[in-house]
Amino acid sequence: MNSIRTLRLKVSLGIIGLMWLNVVMVSLRAFSIEDPATFWVVAGSAVVAGLATLVWLQDRAGATAAVGVSVANAGLVCLLVYGFRDSNLQSDIHMYFFAVLAICSALLEWRALLAYAAVVAVHHLTLFFTVPMAVFPTNSGFSRVVLHALVLSLETGVLIAIVVMMTRALVRSENALAEAASAERATSEIEARSRAQELSTVREREQLAIDADTTFKHCLHHATAGISDGIRKLADGNLAFTMDTPFAPEFEALRGDMNDAVGRLGNVLREVSAVATRIDDGAQDVAGAVTDLSRRTERQAGTVEETAAALAEITESVAASAKRTEEARSVALQANKDAAQSSGVVENAEQAMRRIEASSQQISSIIVAIDEIAFQTNLLALNAGVEAARAGEAGKGFAVVAQEVRELAQRSATAAREIKSLIQTSTSEVETGVKLVRNTGEALKTIGSQVVTINSLMDQIAVSARDQSSSLSSVSSAVNGMDQVTQQNAAMVEQTTASVSALAQEALRLKDMIGEFSLTTERQPRRSQRAA
């Protein structure tokens, strides 16, 4: 019941305060309406509240105090309803009965709720029949009294049920707490006895723990010494050792793990060393191949450059030959025209022997020119044959054409010498010119046909020379492009050589670094010592 009393002590303070607040509200309402009975109303409310307060002070958490305070609050609400007679709010003030009843339920005393409901019921029934306006406004029937009674009964019943359940729950809770406290005291006694027993057990365990700790420290020192020695060997680069001295059983796995780690590290470094050796060998092979490729690329670049220069010279020579062939063609055309004119002169030879002599001289000059042209053509054909031979496979076709031109030039030179001899004979024997005019005409016709033939050959030579010049220009462009590509290849070969050299140096450096470790049972000398 201690929890119920504690709760009542806390709640009763608020309800006492509410009671005196009701006294204040009743007094204010009485003074506001100027009722002749104001004094008695105020005095009565103060007396009721004072008596309830005295009862409460006797036993603040008792049932009597709860009943007294509840009855006093009910009476004060009755006076407040009376104070609102002839007011529209009188019916609304009735709701305050139910509100205060709910507040009084916090005292957790069902008798107080029942007393509160009894006071309200007596008030409603008595005053309804004696002073109706003190309870309800005018024109209120008994049905309203019945309705209020039903609502009051329902609320009171529910609140009493709630209070009873809460009271029982608190009682059960207190009983459970008391039982728990009793059990706790019993447990404390049992624990005290067990502590005494455990104390001796703990002391024995402490001694065992001290002994075990000493043994463990010794084993730990032995294990750490072995691990430390292994780490020193690792720091010295020795990966060929194994920790053969057994450790304590709890540290034996550590020794096995250490040996496994050292063995795996040694295997890895051996694999790395082998890979570094293969990289070094491969780099040396690649370096040799790249050096040989560089030399061959340089030679090829020189050859391509010389070929480009030779093709440029051949192109210029062919262009010059084409130009000269065009000039020879023009001369041949002129010679053809002159031969035609000479035929007319021959027909009139009998009337103008002097003119024949002049024409003979002109023909002699032309023949000299033809002889020179044939000589130059022969030289050009000879040069073209030489250049075609130098061009190799690409100049075979041009060599055949040059040979044909050369033969034609020789025949032209032979014909020119024969014509020259005839003209000299006809000049020395002018007196027999008439007889020889016809022969001269026929010779001129022959010359004309030969000139036409020469002209046709010159056309062919000119066309062939132009084609050869165009082809040689294309070949020259291709060779120049090949020269540029060869130069780029040479530059790339130099870069590859530099990269391979750097790779070889890094491989040697890796081998030197691995050489710092001993991977066999006999420690290998370091590279620095070998170098010394």
Image (cartoon, helix red, strand yellow):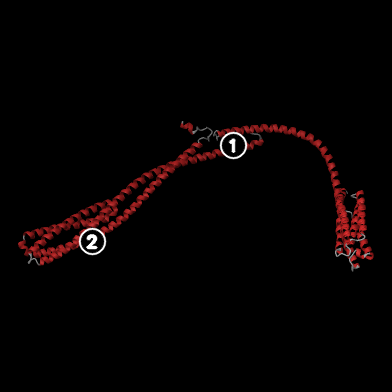
From this viewpoint, which residue is outermost toward the left? 431
Q: Quadrant of residue 415?
A: bottom left
Name the element at disc 2.
Answer: helix
Mark 1 or mark 2: whose residue is earlier in sequence: 1
The three-letter amino acid code for the residue at tag 2 is Asp
Locate residue 91 relative to residue 443 in the image: left or right: right
Residue, x 75% and y 33% (percent of image)?
A: 206
Where is residue 195? Give x, y as percent.
80, 37
Q: Which residue is mark 2?
A: 459
Q: Which residue is mark 1?
A: 259
Residue at 29%, 57% (x, y): give it: 470
Q: Is residue 26 above or below residue 240?
A: below
On screen, residue 249 above or below 79 = above
Which three-letter amino acid code belongs to the residue tagged 1? Asn
Which structural element holds mark 1?
A: helix
**Image coordinates for residue 75, horizontal then vertical, percent:** 91, 58
User: Dot 1 surroundings within 10 Å: few (below 14), some, or many (20 or more)?
Assistant: some
Residue closest to the eye, 278 or 173:
173
Q: Which mark is residue 371?
A: none
Res 185 visible: yes
Are the residues flagged by discs 1 and 2 in contact, CB closer than 8 Å? no
Give the alpha-carbon distance from disc 1 to disc 2, as whole Å: 97 Å
| Relative image position of residue 381 (x, y in whole percent) | 22, 55
- Image position of 467 (left or right of 49): left
Front-lying residue, 311 or 29:
29
Q: Give residue 252's quadrant in the image.
A: top right
* Residue 353: percent from left, percent from top: 7, 64
